[in-house]
Image: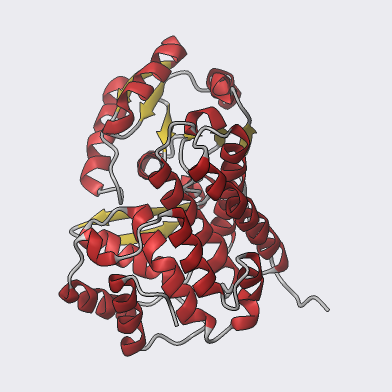
Amino acid sequence: MIDLFTFDSTVPRIVFGVGSLSKVSEELGRLGRGRALVLSTPHQENDAQALASALGELAVGVFSRAVMHTPVKVTADALSVFNETGADCVVSLGGGSTIGLGKAIAFRNNAPQLVVATTYAGSEVTPILGQTENGIKTTIRTSSVLPKTVIYDPELTFDLPVTMSVTSGLNAMAHAIEGLYAQDRNPIASLLAMEGLAALRKALPAIVKLPRDAQARADALYGSWLCGVVLGAVGMSLHHKLCHTLGGTLDLPHAETHAILLPHTVSYTEQAVPELLAPVARLFSSPRAGTGLHDFGLSLGAPMRLRDLGVTGDDLDRATALAVSNPYWTPRPLEAGGVRALLQDAWEGVRPS
């Protein structure tokens, strides 16, 4: 018998497939917009300039200073450029950093967004904005930051470095896994979660072996899209709280932090709700989900230790205090000792027990 549930999700228009980058101008037309500010990170500035050139008079400029964790100061600078150029929308080319900047702009001026996703972040299909000010990262959930259209072109990920592909994919997996034990979990979100996890479980090892495998790249984008839909449909829990706390406070690399913490946060939660995580354990052919995820990450060459990111013992103490003092909902009560032990295991990179 299926219990009473509510499923509330608004997914942007999706344009998926090889060559779909060429559809940007057409999609801008559908939105009734013709003065796009193209956003990117400094690393992807050349790609952003090429896209702006291809758009011709539909683009008014490029802002290529998007960075991790969406600092409020960078958003202010981007808004100045948006206003100076007379832009009427943004085109975000890239992953979570660029998508976050586009959302931050939209939150402040309601500008329509078109996203060209080049990683497996998943945030492009969520109404969630995370931004950082004075070393504190906060999140906002509002429909005003949801992009209007998302373009997934597997060709744009062919040259995504393998290490970044792995960590970005594990980051996407975290969205789906937390959806399985969310307070507002429901059968629809759980189906999407397991479909997304299965696609990434298949794709990531293939990408490690052959980075330009077109089918694997398409599978990874498909999986990350579904995992992102889960992130947007239900609430997140301990894993995302710790990643936001560590990332915003210490300015850690976003995807790597997710990849390292995931086996340990899952193992902590699994002790309270093993039945909800049993499908994940089966997917990874392991008695438990936490150990299965650890072994999977290890097989992919994923980063495994927080200490390799420069995290110290004092940092772990501070993160524990912040997480426990202002927690997200979690099926296992947050105990300072348990959270600190979890972080210690992640710092050392040990296999969850």
| Quadrant in the picture for residue 14 | top right
Q: For this rendering, which residue is in front, 208 or 316?
A: 208
Percent of width and height locating residue 23: 58, 21
Percent of width and height locating residue 274: 60, 82
In the displayed image of the protein, which residue is found farthest to the top? 56
State whether residue 301 appears in this view. Answer: yes
Q: Quadrant of the C terminus?
A: bottom left
**Count of all numbered marks drawn on residues in the image:** 0
Q: For this rendering, which residue is in front, 291 or 79?
A: 291
Name the residue: 46% across, 14% down. Answer: 55
Name the residue: 47% across, 58% down. Answer: 299
Name the residue: 29% across, 53% down. Answer: 253
Percent of width and height locating residue 256: 35, 56
| Quadrant in the picture for residue 51 | top left
Q: Is residue 47 above or below residue 339?
A: above
Is 29 on the left or on the right of 116, as rendered? Answer: right
Q: For this rendering, which residue is in front, 247 or 136?
A: 247
Coloration mode: secondary structure
Name the residue: 36% across, 79% down. Answer: 342
Percent of width and height locating residue 343: 31, 76
State whether residue 184 appears in this view. Answer: no
Q: Quadrant of the N terminus?
A: bottom right
Q: Is residue 289 above or below residue 161?
A: below
| Quadrant in the picture for residue 334 | bottom left
Q: Is residue 145 above or below residue 149?
A: below
Is 337 on the left or on the right of 143, as rendered? Answer: left
